[in-house]
Amino acid sequence: MGKDDKVKKEKKEKKEKKVKKEKKEKKDKKEKSSRKAASSSTKATTRKPRAKKEGAEEKVATGGGRKRKAIVRTEDDFEPFNRWWEKDPEDNAAKWSYLEHHGMIFTPPYEPHGVKMLYKGEPIDLPPEAEEVATFFAQTLGTDWCQKEKFQNNFWADFQAKLPKELKSKITKLKDCDFEPIKNYLDKRSEAKKARTKEEKEAEKEAKRLNDHPYTHVIVDELRERVGNFRVEPPNLFRGRGDHPKMGKLKQYILPEDVTVNCAADAPAPRCPVPGHAYKDVVHDPAVTWLAWFTDTINNQVKYVFLNAASGFKGQSDWLKYEKARKLKKYIRGIRDDYTKKMKSTDDDEKELGTAVYLIDRLALRVGNEKNTEEEADTVGCCSLRVEHMTFEADNKITLDFLGKDSIRYLNTVQVDPLVYKNLKALCKARKPEDMIFSIDPSKVNDYFKQFMQELSAKVFRTYNASITLEQELCKFDPEEHDISDPSEMVKFYNDANRRVAILCNHQRAPPKQHEAGMERLKKKLADQEATLRGLEGRRDELLGKTVSKDVKEIIVEKKLEKSNNMDSLVRKIKSQKLAAERTKIQIADKEDNKTVSLTTSKINYMDPRISVAFCKSHDCPIEKIFAKTIRNKFPWAMHSKSTWRF
């Protein structure tokens, strides 16, 4: 056999061995997969079936054998929605023809915990009524409330009223009382509640949901609507707003006998959920939209239970409010001409009325009513301004400094009409600091407004001025000066306009507690983005053969950019990083500008939502960036406005 034949034979044998080996491997692989399939099928038949969630459907098989969860629909997905705005909304005398609900949930009786307070270091065993009030005070320890003298005095009077005679004569001074043992008990109970397992929390949540379920909705004219608040206010120590004279007083239990409920005559009357009790009265009044009312035990004011803010009743009320403000637009010039004439009048009453109306219109002041400062906080409006609230500056400027609604300070220096400046100075000159500037009654101001529009009042001016100011500010938007593809820039522009309205209406707030921490996080984020940008630009320069500083080289190494060798990819990353840094800068500026201004109050109560919707539709700005879900749910009728809509 020749040498060539021998080589050929070896090659042939090698090839045959290789083919045999491949066949064997293929066969083994096939057997292995068949055994695995048989094993898995056996497991599938013997495995215990997984328990299905209540109300859930079986998983549906899709192509490729994978399974997905079925979409479970609830009654909310099928029931009709109240699209009242598609009809012709009117302020009719009868608000409904059928109304059915289950009433209210009441606070359960107090359960004593038995923890003793200390008096001069001695443990005191309190009766349940006094222990409850002591527990309310212990909850305020560590807050600003328990440091206020009025709060302490009012609490002490109500606490002593709950003590029996033998303890009342013994416990005589608040400074000798130590409520720390109760506070420690409450803190431990709170920690234990937080430490519960997820299953325990879910079980409690489900039990609460089932208990609340009958009370969460009502039936109004064959439609289901959500209730705003179906729980009565629980007892506690009254806080109030600002320097309220009744802060610290005990809010008593509201019982079914204090509550009057309203429903249709042909609907089943709500059952009282508290055994042995009954509602004060059940009335059938279709002219009102409240479900129930009771009297507040602190200020003796009537409090109502209404439907949710997204309900048809509230929606129609909002729509009528904004339409009233739009109607004022037709009369505003005539009203301004008329009160300007009155300011020039020789009659003192006419001059005073014209000047007061100017302040209500131009400064968006509330009309103001005289108050009993022993019962309510000393808040003022236009007609109740005192001389001490106003100072006069040069160039026809006045400075107003007073407590407005909810005890929020109004501090504003503004330039007024020379005639207004002259009239105000003359009114203040003849009066003492504690005297009121105007002697006119607020009802006279509203009667004056009704000469122009029957439904016009001072309140409508605030809505009108807020809405018209917002529209004027948004009309300044120039697409050529702003990047409409960047939602953060659009939001910044809108928030700037919103802030001007909030300042006009004095919608202020204290800086949020987490403001500084939030600003630090944003600044740190911006510094990191700018460092990354420098590193990317440095790496690009390296690839172009340019000199790069030592600092930039360190950033390149730190950010692991030395492996980025694709120029096109680097250019894209640089562009993206620049945009990210710009967005963060906008966020920082926006957050800082709005830290003491409440933008939400204007959105919810004063600015016509259709202005904002039209702006978003005109410039393709997502409405979700402007209105949170709660506001979108509150104004579903406004979401259908066209981009061409104008106030």
Image (cartoon, grey):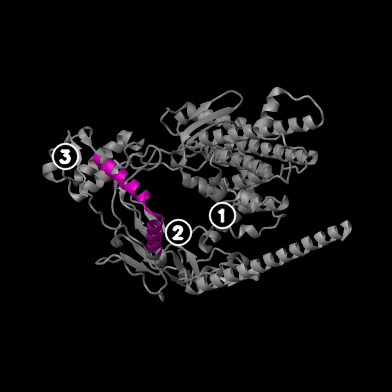
SS at mark 2 in the image: loop
**Numbered circle sitting on residue 228:** 2
- Residue type, label 1: Lys
Decide which of 604, 361 is in the foreground and name it: 604
**Numbered circle sitting on residue 341:** none
Left or right placement of residue 144 versus residue 570 in this view: left
Residue bearing the label numbered 3: 123
Residue 358 visible to the viewer: no
> For the image shown, how many numbered marks are present on the structure?
3
Give percent across and percent down for residue 85. Answer: 60, 64
Distance (Cα) linking label 2 and label 3 = 44 Å
Asked if the stretch drawn in magenta spans residue 189, the answer is yes
Decide which of 372, 453 is in the foreground and name it: 372
Q: Which residue corresponds to the image point at 19% horizontal and 46% vertical from the top-left?
A: 162
Residue bearing the label numbered 1: 629
- Residue type, label 2: Gly
